[in-house]
Image: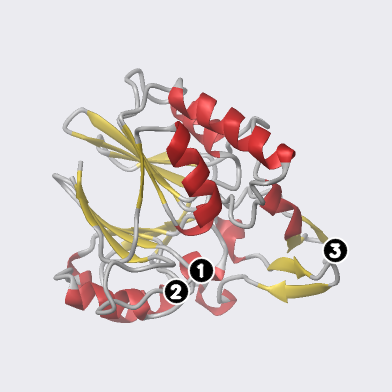
Amino acid sequence: MKVITLLENRTISKEYKCKHGLSLYIETSNHKILFDTGTDDSFVQNACKLGVNLEDIDIAVISHGHYDHGGGLEAFLKCNSKAKIYIQKSAFDKHLIKLFKVVKYNIGLNKKLIDNNRFEFVDNMIKIDNELVLLGNVQGDKLIPKGNDKLLKENRQGLVVQDDFEHEISLLINDQGKYSLFCGCAHKGIVNIIERTKDIIDNELNTVIGGFHLMGMNIKKSESKKFLDDLSSMLIINNIDKYYTCHCTGEQAYSYLSQKMKNLDELKTGKVIEI
């Protein structure tokens, strides 16, 4: 399996655009997959330079309803006419971020796109075929990212409440007997998402790829260090060969975790990995 980072906050070369967001191209034995689109059409421009033909993609997945993961949906619909796009229906609800403890800024998706007949809506779990499973409805409260506290949504009554991230889905791939888990931001907690896969597969996960939503953590604070120490310990005991993290994990948290975990690496725009 090949994974090409089409967009991430940083880049391996000035040749590629980078923005706060995530977009991955995944090529398996049977599928060509787009996992998230980033904020706009930057992933399209990078795909061209990286030799990825977006017209060939047969499946797209939008991990959750934030613009930095699905803001490029309209651009994808224009350059690809066949791929089914899997998304949780509430991803199109109004999502907001609280800035300076007062300002509520819209970070949601373009609601005008919701009626497109290429969307396949995921509630709990969808098994696409023997290779691909999409899973939502992650339970558990282990090591939920503190950054979630600033993230809100508008409920059906029109009230602004704390986001419960029911709109978040993850992708599980079985490529020739090796299991890989792809997460967008792991708002539900990366440990809880990994544990969710145990309900689905008998084998161990080989690889986990995605953001851990730890950006902004001050590692000088004892509570942050404890969180990261607990997180690294729980990730290590999962017996996973390799973790690749990116985007919302943050430089400080990544640097701290990488000192604890020998099997942790990071993604940047333009990076290609073979699994």
Q: SS at mark 2?
A: loop
Residue 12: horizontal and vertical position, in percent? 28, 67
Upstream in sequence: badge 2 or badge 1:
2
Mark pair 3, 2: CA separation: 31 Å
Mark pair 2, 1: CA separation: 9 Å
Q: Mark 2 highlights which residue?
A: 19
Q: SS at mark 3?
A: loop
Upstream in sequence: badge 3 or badge 1:
1
Residue 127: horizontal and vertical position, in percent? 36, 38
Which label number is shown at residue 159? 3
From the image, which quarter does the N terminus lie in?
top left
Indicate whether 212 appears above or below 240. Answer: below
Which is more toward the observer, 127 or 249?
249
Residue 111: horizontal and vertical position, in percent? 58, 75
Q: Label 1 is placed on what type of residue?
A: Asp
Q: Label 2 is placed on what type of residue?
A: Lys
Q: Label 3 is placed on what type of residue?
A: Leu
Which is more toward the observer, 123 or 142?
142
- Are dots 2 and 1 in contact, CB under 8 Å? yes
Find residue 104 and report its image quarter.
Answer: bottom right
For the point 30% across and 29% down, which residue is it? Answer: 241
Mark pair 3, 1: CA separation: 24 Å
Q: Residues within 10 Å of mark 2 (few under 14, many from 20)?
A: some
Total numbered labels: 3
Indicate whether 240 appears above or below 128. Answer: above
- Are dots 3 and 2 in contact, CB under 8 Å? no
Q: Mark 1 highlights which residue?
A: 68
Q: Residues within 10 Å of mark 1 (few under 14, many from 20)?
A: many
Q: Residues within 10 Å of mark 3 (few under 14, many from 20)?
A: few
For the point 65% across and 38% down, which residue is it? Answer: 225
Residue 270: horizontal and vertical position, in percent? 26, 66
